[in-house]
Image: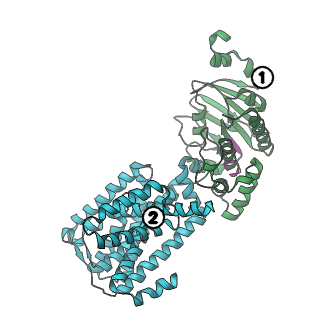
Chain colours: A green, B cyan
Amino acid sequence: MTKNFGNLIALQDVDVVLRKGEILGMIGPNGSGKTTLFNVISGIYAPLSGEIRFQGQAITNKKPHMICRLGIARTFQIVQPFGQMNLLENVLIGSMYGRGMPIETGRNKAEEVLYFVGLKDKMYLTANEVTTEDRRRLELARALATEPQIILLDEIMAGLTPAEIEEALKLLYEVNRRGISIFMVEHIMKAVMTISTRIIVLNYGQKIAEGSPKEMAENPEVIKAYLGDRYV
Amino acid sequence: MIILGAVAPLGISGYWLRFITFIFMWIGLAGSLNLLTGYTGYLDFGHVAFFGIGSYGTGVLMVKLGMPFFPAMLISAVLAGFLAIIVGIPTMRLRGAYFAIAMLAFAEAMKQVVLEFDGITGGGNGLSLPIYTNYQFFYYAMLGTVLLLIGTTYGFENSKFGKGLMAIREAELAAEVTGINTLYCKLIAFGISAFFAGIIGGIYAYWMTFLYPGDTFSVLITMRMIIMAFLGGAGTLLGPIIGAAFLATIEEILWAEFKYTYLIIVGFIVVFVVLILPRGLVGLFRQRILAR
């Protein structure tokens, strides 16, 4: 069943398979195409060639809002909150539009998700009034409110303190435990190595390695991409 | 308030009736712009086009086809809304200044269309409508439109659709990937906004009984709508009402006192208010309430 539920993603010559229930980490130097890959999956860019399949269905040229409604949510590396709206309304957009809920049930869902990420106390503050860390949680909450099958996380831990990273990891484990597959880009190695069940490495727009976190840490290609030839 | 508005015209002079009817008209126009610009963030520099389409549509249907006022006005307003959606399909893919410029060009183009087809529109000679001097009728027509507009704006504030528009205004890409069909929502908002501008245009045409392309499609009308909406507070229910009433009243007072220099003074007041109150007059009241 897990196999049949798999998702095949191809971008130029990058092939990625995200299996149901897994936490797939993606690493690679700056400019290696990680965010671009996310943008193609979420429908912001159309791929030049290749195909994106989700639950056996081709979603290659679908608009971003359709992809979201199908069950692929995402967060942005540079957070994009709805600044003048309060946190409840921010998350409500996810439940109303991403999941098609009317405003009343959408509100219940939004409050539940805000509680889950620990923002319930602040739900009547506007997104402009909360800290960067809270905005990252908000970004996650908004995506979760769409009740996705897959969530694409683009560096949600950047700029967090070690204690906050611990918190974030716990939260992500819990998200995953609820049956949501995670595909994450992360620069913080400790975090991504800890949480990922599998890791892929991009360099110059190509997939140079794939495997368990341990294998990746020992892979000469990966070390070369990050540190240069001399360290191999 | 509503009762006062309903009985007021019975006891006031022609001057005041006209003045208040004008204020309603500007509340309506600023409010129609607010539905689009205030909620989606798309600044429309050609919004007068829809006022003009409403005006000329009503005029042409009444004069050339002998249609009664109400159906003529409604058809014209629907036409304005429909045209907004058609124009919006290409232009609403543009953001910021590009949309504003495209709409500015659209309004100028509509003026040229009216000038060109002078066999139907009267062109540069203007268009005279059947004369109707029951000024209380226009008062109630404008008031009714404003109430309908307030109801619609209230709906925007509290509905799923309105929240979606605000999300587009705040972060359009994030709105799209969170499941909002942004183009569709923007087009519907644009259509509703233009429909209201069209209704006001239709009432205005019948009220003034004479239309001239240069005045009816004047960019100054757009500017006033924008200034009033932002002065009061764009993206709020009360903003355009307060902004329009405030500016129209100030202008009227100053015009009586300083016949030749009043526009300069008005200009300074607008600059001053915008500088110290970036969120409009409504923003000031909100701050006061929060400070308590």
Are the residues under marks 1 and 2 on the same chain? no
Residue B228 sits above or below residue A121 on the image: below
State how many labels appear. 2
Amino acid type, callout 1: Lys
Up-down relation of residue B269 to residue A30 (above or below)? below
**Is residue B47 found left or right of A222 in the rendered image?**
left
Please give the chain letter of the residue carrying mark 1.
A
Judged from the image, the secondary structure of the residue bearing numbered disc 1 is: helix
> Where residue A229 sits in the image (x, y, percent)?
63, 11
- Residue at image mark 2: B191
Name the residue nearer the viewer: A48 or B24.
B24
Q: Position of residue A37 (x, y in %)?
A: 59, 34
Judged left or right of residue B5, residue A222 is right
Compared to B47, does A4 lie above or below?
A: above
Return the x and y of residue A202 as percentages of the image width and height.
63, 26
Mark 2: few, some, or many residues within 10 Å (few <14, many ≥20)?
many
Cα separation, mark 1 vs mark 2, equals: 57 Å
Residue lying farthest to the bottom in this orientation: B10
The quarter of the rendered structure image containing the N terminus of chain A is: top right
- Quick check: can you spot residue B9? yes
Disc 2: which chain? B
* Magenta region, residue range: A142-151
User: Which residue is painted at 18% across and 71% down in the image?
Assistant: B125
Q: Toward which corner of the image does residue B78 lie, by quadrant?
A: bottom left
- Residue B65 image position (x, y, % from top left): 29, 80
**In what element is the residue under mark 2?**
helix
* Picture residue at 45% right of the left edge, 76% below the top: B145
User: Of B184 and A89, which appears nearest the observer?
Assistant: A89
Which residue corresponds to mark 1?
A214
